[in-house]
Image (cartoon, helix red, strand yellow):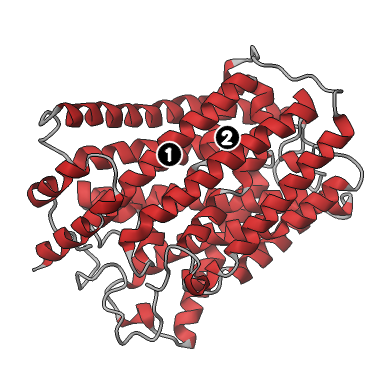
Amino acid sequence: MAQDQEVNRYQAGQGLMAADSSERSSDVEKNVKPFKSSQSKGSEGPFGNEENAEVKFKTMTWWMKNSRQAGMIMIAETISLGILSLPSVLAEIGMVGGVILILGLGAVATYTGYVIGQFKLAYPGVHNMADAGEVMLGGIGREIFGAAQILFLIFVMGSHILTFSIMMNTITEHATCSIVFGIVGLALSLICTLPRTLRRVSYMAIASFISILAAVLITMVGVGVEKAGHDRVLATVVAPFSKAFLATTNIVFAYAGHVGFFSFISEMKEPETYMKSLYLLQGCDISMYLLVAVVTYRYAGVDVASPALGSTSGILPKLAYGIAIPTIVIAGVINGHVAAKFVYVRLFRGTDKMSKDTWGAFFRWALIVFVLWTAAWIIAEAIPVFNDLLGLVSALFASWFTYGLSGVFWLYMNHGRYGESKKKMALTGVNVCIFLIGSIVCVLGLYASGTAIGDDSKGRNGSFSCGDNSKSKT
């Protein structure tokens, strides 16, 4: 019965999957085995049967119905801080190379997101990367993938606290110690992460998207008016390897929302509609990234700031950062929610504590949220340079969660059938290449980000510094 449920759930989503759909149903029947987490008591997925639950988690639709928008949550999570580093990427590697990488890595990210959807539909019990690791490698895979996921999310949360302190320093002209601003960002993010369901968090997602859209528009208009025709723009740039590759990892970070996709699908009423949310996300992020990066670099020139909102002068940076506050906070909150939900599900999966609506349940959730955001604040203070932090996060984690692991997922689902047809052989080659992309970005990105952190620590504010962190240009 469990296997029939797994197969039927997978086949229900086939009409939405364009690639190799004609061969998938037979592969599923032969390859897919029912997955039930070692911590789960049922086969209904991570939240079990919610018919009589006090707190229901599976409430989101793919778009707009009753404001329960999986698509908007994915957009708010992904299109946030990453977009603010892209103009400086073009300054480091040139207009031509930057545009090619934004388009190319965006196309690959679309396919890898599609593979994650395939894997989730094949194994509905998977709620996070740890569960995916358990499917493929058993208990060891669960621990390795789980540790990597939680560390990645904490680093991303830290990048939002760092950006919050940069924003406050810009608006207030460094009115107080940067550590104090970081603590304010920590407290605000913690409070906003207290709702336990993504449905409630999704209400903030539209505000986040409107916020970042308005902020980058103000920046683009501002640099266009202030600096039209006054700054150099280079089609190609000969840069030191470490700087050039660090710029590439910042593009990887801009597409780093994949780590939360399993969690988002798990809280959808109809997981089969996930692909609509994915295509909505990728259409928005690729077009926005390209537009913002090219226009801002075109007018700000080689000295463009990172985050890009600081590329203008006078009142405009303060205005842009003020409008960007919802994105700086909410996108971090979404990542914080995914991290907290990972721990919460890990601790209480298969128990009635999962869906209880009591003060005890709220306290347990709040304690998890507090610990995670405190760890994120420590990281933000320890690595106070925006691009360096993004590069380190991308090399260590986004390289795998957005790219490398999706290749592994496809190879696992199609094990033993790589040579069945020319199409299957071609897809095998594609997914091996995706795995190699993740490996290369990880190894070389670690070298580049480590070199940059070492260099920047000599000439800028150090760790846990009260100094003004809003003056960095890269």
In the rendered view, tell whether residue 230 sits above or below residue 210.
Answer: above
Residue plotted at (21% across, 54% down): 122
| Quadrant in which the C terminus appears | top right
Point out the residue furthest to the right here: 314
Q: Secondary structure at mark 2?
A: helix
Nearer-the-camera pick, 451 or 259: 259
Image coords of residue 446 (percent x, y): 50, 29
Q: Is residue 231 visible?
A: yes
Dot label at residue 442: none
Lateral position of residue 373 relative to residue 25, left or right:
right
Residue plotted at (29% across, 28% down): 430
Residue under numbered circle 1: 109
In the rendered view, tell whether residue 451 sits above or below residue 107.
Answer: above
Residue plotted at (72% across, 45% down): 216
Lateral position of residue 180 relative to residue 98, left or right:
right
Image coords of residue 347 (percent x, y): 35, 69
Dot label at residue 250: 2
Q: Nearer the viewer, mark 1 or mark 2?
A: 1
Question: Of label 1 and label 2, which has the lower sequence position?
Answer: 1
Lateral position of residue 274 relative to residue 188, left or right:
left
User: Which amino acid, by three-letter code, is at mark 1?
Assistant: Ala
| Structural crowding at the residue carrying mark 2, measured as other residues with C-alpha within 10 Å and reported as few (<14), some (14–19) or many (≥20) | many
Q: Is residue 387 visible?
A: no
User: Which amino acid, by three-letter code, is at mark 2?
Assistant: Asn
